Amino acid sequence: MKVKHTTVVRAPVAEVRDLVADVRWWPLLFENIVLVEVLEQSDDSDRLRLWAVDIDAAFDAASSAGGAAEAAPGVLRSWTARRTFRRTGAPTISFRQEAPHPPLLSMGGTWEFRAVPGTDSCEVTLAHEVEADGGTDRHPWIGPMVEAATNSQLAGLRTVAQLPRGAALSVADLSGAVGVPGGDAGPLDVLANLPALPALADAVRIPLTSDAFLAAEPGRRGHRLTICLGLPGGRVVTKRLRPPAALLALTDEWTVNPGTGSADGPRLGVHRRALLSEPRHGQREHGRVHERVRSCLAADLRDRLRQLTALSTVAA
């Protein structure tokens, strides 16, 4: 089965191509991508591990969850893929999953980027080629899944690339760290054992895999959902699903840095990246709105660090 869609992005070819090529953008660029890590890299290819969430399935799981939530397998998926880059002529980025989940036998495709003559716009084509055990017709969910993924990726790319001040200027990069009491138990366990994040007493935690859960916080307009993913080395990556209107994406990466001496306890560190959306019609000047949003994000981050410090003190 082949699925191919084309869109026009009002941005130069090089800028659009670089957004797709640089996987550090993907959790901000694509709604379903939680994390991408580069396993291997050369001038003309790379190998990636990706984690992606089924957004609709996540909200369905939260809606049906009670106080003691059952596991929701299939909401979060992970796979490895290889990409190759053609930089001459019309640039392309080809990709292929290494071991697709059954019943898929192969999953791959190509991004193509072409300048629109006489403009600063770029025509982007995203093509997928899929093979399944017994043929894709035997699995009616595959076609809609690939169509939805293709349209979502092109829409995300178009939205971010066309931000009036450029994508990079619309990103809030925030960091923080706090010392916590020392000891063999406590702070390390609080961070390494995922239930500490988000540190909210009223969040329902829905297990997804052995090292990930979905935090569902009740809100006035339905659940606020956060994917929490544990990684080796005391790292925890979180991503807010369908964030408030002021944000297009919000991710945090938490780490534990051991103390340097017997008197020094560990430090909890966090790096937050948020992609800010455009002010709505009638709002104040662009820069003032973004500054206000950045201030709110920084204040929330300080609150989270204080919450984790309090939890660590109790656990120790």
Image (cartoon, grey):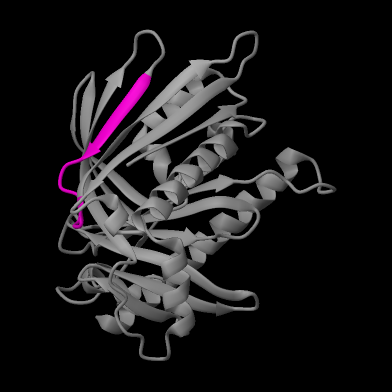
**Left or right of 221: which side holds 251?**
left
In the rendered image, which quarter contains the C terminus?
Answer: bottom left
Residue 96: in magenta span: yes
Q: Nearer the viewer, residue 27 or 100?
A: 100
Q: Nearer the viewer, residue 300 or 218?
A: 218
Question: Residue at left 55%, top 21%?
Answer: 122
How many circles with numbers are drawn on the protein? 0
Is residue 1 depicted above or below 64 in this figure?
above
Image quadrant assignment for residue 315: bottom left
- Residue farthest along the bottom direction in this orientation: 67
Image quadrant assignment for residue 191: bottom left
**Left or right of 178: which side holds 249?**
right
**Left or right of 161: which side holds 132?**
left
Q: Residue 116 in the image: state x and y as whole percent.
A: 58, 15
Residue 243: in magenta span: no
Question: Residue at left 41%, top 77%?
Answer: 61
Magenta stretch?
Answer: 92-104
Q: Residue 56 in the image: state x and y as whole percent.
A: 46, 65
In the rendered image, which quarter contains the N terminus?
Answer: top left
Q: Residue 33 in the image: state x and y as whole percent.
A: 38, 50
Question: Residue at left 62%, top 58%?
Answer: 296
Is residue 35 depicted above or below 184 in this figure?
above
Q: Residue 59 in the image: state x and y as whole percent.
A: 47, 71
Can I make out residue 90 in this image? Answer: yes
Can I make out residue 255 in this image? Answer: no
- Residue farthest along the right direction in this orientation: 282
Is residue 235 depicted above or below 40 in this figure?
below
Q: Nearer the viewer, residue 274 or 20?
A: 20
